[in-house]
Every structure is written in structure tokens, then in C-alpha cells.
Amino acid sequence: MLGGMGSLDDSHIVATAAAAASNAAVSKATASNAARPLSVSARLGRLQFHNSGKFRILQLSDIQDGPTVSSDTIRLIAAACDAARPDLVVLTGDQIAGYHSAYHATYRKRRWNTALDSIIGVGRQAANFLGDAMQGFPQTPQISESSQRRQEELDERANSASDPDDAQRLAHERALAGTRDLVRQSIRQFMQPIVERGIPFAVTYGNHDFQCGIDNCEFDAIFRELPGCLNPETTGAEPQRAMHMPGSGMPGQVAYAAEPGTFALPVSDVGHTRTVFGIVLLDSGDYARGGGYGSPSATGLDFLRTVPRLMDGAKSIVFQHIPLPQFYDLLRVVPSTTAYAVQGYRTYDSQTYLLDETKTLPGSFLGEGISCPDADSGEFQVMKDSDGYFALFAGHDHRNGFVGVDDGIMLGATPTCGFGAYGPDPKMRSARLFEFDIRHPYAPRTQLLQFGDLVGKPSSRKAYTFAMSHVPTNAGDTWNLLRRPKVFGSVLAVAVGLVAGKLFGGGKEK
């Protein structure tokens, strides 16, 4: 136990998962029974505590796959939903690998894309080709008939356009129609286990989603096509106005919206007499023009200041993609020769680190440097000054899974749940479960639900899983791998990693 936090009993969750697996017929019937969703809150029509005094959230981060989502990713999501029986699923960004070769016609490395960025992007697509080759080239889904008709219409208009600019614009619209269709198919694949089980969900975005060419507002619209989506419409949003979402299937639920991927959801007590705590999803940005990762917008930070008033004084938990610089406060500096030490990222790359066991929960692990923005946006201070927040959880760093407390606020990193990008050992790819108790809602218990415990062995090819687990994502990762005794013993594996990391970048960008 650390600062009032605790991890859920592993044996209970694993036993629950085993029971679900051994009774597949019942699970399937439950999943397909729209009259009785798996989520208790869905049955009650709003996010609220149960009569038992409990409330559960399942966090999924960094699915980060192309149009054909890995079957292992879908198996993990399904098993985690069955084991956790959450009231709400929260997806914290990089659902889409926007750099995937299937999106090459609309790919943009940055929102302010330049010709040089497009050239560099070829390297990303080459890396994706290598990953596809290791998986036996999974087939990209065909676009729908409606998209084909739309593309044919745009082709005709482009061919007959007399203005070259119009022709170019129509050609881009044609490419976007194809990308939009493939993205929609990808989303429906990884969302299927959640939707089938009748679990409400909320989504924010990362630094790779937009790279396919689709903006967050359009992602929101695609997710809202699915039942249970709690992402509110943000066009003309007034952050202090409660919005009902009739299309969500949650008639009693309200949301407060700021911008796509940034909104708040109150969670009430059993009798609907008060808000017990708030759930805030925050778009943490993507890239900074000066280099490194971005930060929340001014609108997002203003929204964080506003939320405590909207929650009637109840505190909130924040979910976002990119971690804060304060995550480094949970680490301790060690000599570079220390086994399993990791090099910091950019601003912090002059030192090497291990987790500080006095500040983090048992079972936490650090597999890579924390890839936070170079500049501190002041987000953590906003949370402190408002006295309206008790926790912040992020994804982004696929190999990190830890929880600790810094200056009274719980901070947590959740590893990837996907098998389409780099990450920890396949058995450690995870979803994160939170269980809140109404007696002490600001000290939730949390646990990683790992693939190895819930599902078993991955179906992906060994070469693919090894490459995605061990190829370095930047120069610092190369040395991090050399500090792992088991990896150090395999000189050939490291050499391959060095070459691949140098040529292709492996999945993380500076």
C-alpha cells in the first residue's frame, strides 16, 4: 500500500478471467444480449456507483494499428472486458497508427506538414512494411462500396476540372474518402468487443491518430456512430453547459465539452444526489514546433481550471495520452552502468533512471524513458492550484507500467494493449483496471490486466513479437536494451535492433 493506493488482488482477477474463458458460451450470450449490458452503469443509464459501493474503469492505451487490427489486440480487449466488467472503457490515444502505409496518400508527419516531412515519412512506411513482412503481410480490408462510389465521383470531377488547384483538392478528397473508410473499419474491429458487451466508452487522442489525415473532430464523429460513445459534440461547445447525449444509450448521463478529445463526465452516487468524482479526458497535444512532444492547448488548460466547479467540488481523475514532466519525480537517478536503467528522453537524456520504489506501487515497471514534452505547460500546477484533481494517467510510452504519488496526486503510466507496434514482452501488454470505492473514491485500486494472465500465448509470429518488443525507438533505447542482461547476451539481436532503429525509428518519433 502506498499513499492510500492499492493494487487489486491478482488472484481474484485472474480467477475471474479463467472462469470467463471456461464458460465461453455464456460470455458470448451475455455479450450479444443488448437487454443486459456487461456494464452496470449502462443498465442504469448513467455513470454511477453500484449498490455495492463500487465503480470500475478500464483504460486501453496505444492500440496503434493499421486497417487490419491484430487478433491478439482484440483478444486482450475482449478478455479484459470480461474480467473487469467495467462501467466505462477509456481509450487514451494512438488508437490509429496514422503512419501506416495504407494511409500513405493522406499521411502527414506533423499538422504543419512540409515536403521534407513527407519524405521522412517514407521511412515510417518502410518500417511498417518490415513489420507487415514479419506478420506474413496481413491483408488490408477493401474499402466499402459507398466509398468506392464516392471515389469514382471525385475522380470524374477531378478529371473534368479546369483549375489545377481544384483538381488537386478533389484528388485529396478522393484519397481522404479511402482513408476514412479504412479508419472506420479499424475502429469497428477493436471496438467490437466493447460494443458487443454493452460497455460505454470515452476516447481521447494521441500523437499518431491525426497522421492518417483525419482530424480529431472527425474521429469523434466516427466513434459516435457506435452505441455507447460518450464523446460529446463539441461544435459550439460551452464548457460550463451540461450536455445530454441521446445517441449514447445513456439517457441520464451528462458531459461538459471543451474541444474534441477534451471533456468531463461526472460520476454520481447510487441515489443521484451528488457527484462523487469526475472523469476528465484531455487532448494532450501531439508535437511541438520547436521539437519533441506537444502539450494541451490553452483551451484544454482553461477547461482543467473550470472542471472543479462543474463537479460541485468533487475531485477528478484525468486521462490523457502524453505523460507530464512530473512523472520523472517518480524515478531516481542511477549510474549509466546500472542494470535495467533507462536513459531519459530529450530534456532528461543526460541521466539514467530506475523507478523510485519508495514512491511507486509494487509491480510497477520502467521500460523506456518518459517521453514528456520538453517544456512544462503548467498542467500539473493547474491541477494542484485548483485542488480539484486526485490522479492523472497516461499512455504513450508503450513499455512503461507504473503508479506513484507526486505532491499528493497519483500519477500512472499504462503500457500498450496493442500488438501492432513496439512494446513490452507480449505477455505484458495490458489494459489497466481501476476500482473506486465510494467510501474513499480518491484512492482507487488499480491493476494491469496482462495478456499472459488473461489470454496466454500470442498468435503473432515470434519474429514479429520479438522485433516489436526489442527494436529501439530512439538512440537512448539502444543503450537501454544493452543494460538488460538477457538482451545483452544476444549480440545479434542488438545489432539488428541498432540497424532497424537507425533506419526506421521503430515507432516513436522525437
Image (cartoon, rainbow, N blue to C red):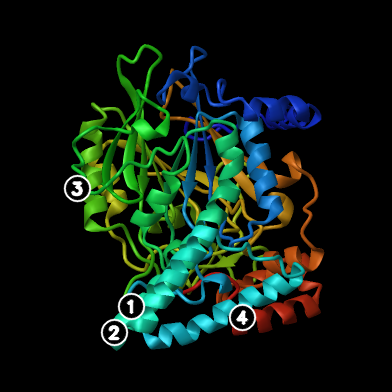
- Say which quarter of the image contains residue 464: bottom right
Mark 3 neighbour class, 10 Å CA radius: few under 14, some 14 to 19, many 20 or more: few
Q: Nearer the viewer, residue 20 or 338?
A: 20
Query: The disc labelled 1 sits on which kind of residue?
Result: Arg
- Ranked by sequence position, the earlier of labels 3 and 4 is 4
Residue occupying the point 79% across, 54% down: 459
Mark whose residue sits in front, 3 or 1: 1
Looking at the rendered structure, the secondary structure element under dot 4 is helix
Q: Is 156 situated left or right of 425 in this image?
A: left
Looking at the rendered structure, the secondary structure element under dot 1 is helix
Looking at the rendered structure, the secondary structure element under dot 2 is helix
Mark 2 neighbour class, 10 Å CA radius: few under 14, some 14 to 19, many 20 or more: few
**How far from the left and from the top, in percent, is residue 62?**
54, 55
**How far from the left and from the top, in percent, is residue 289?**
31, 75
**Residues tagged 3 and 4 counted as in contact (Cβ below 8 A):** no
Gap in angstroms between the C-alphas marked 1 and 4? 27 Å
**How far from the left and from the top, in percent, is residue 140?**
64, 65
Picture quarter with the N terminus:
top right
Which numbered circle lies on residue 165?
2
- Ranked by sequence position, the earlier of labels 3 and 2 is 2
Which numbered circle lies on residue 236?
3
Which numbered circle lies on residue 126?
4
**How far from the left and from the top, in percent, is residue 219?**
41, 54
Mark whose residue sits in front, 3 or 2: 2
Query: The disc labelled 2 sits on which kind of residue?
Result: Asp
Q: Nearer the viewer, residue 213 or 417?
A: 213
Residue occupying the point 38% across, 17% down: 269
Q: Is 243 situated left or right of 334 in this image?
A: left
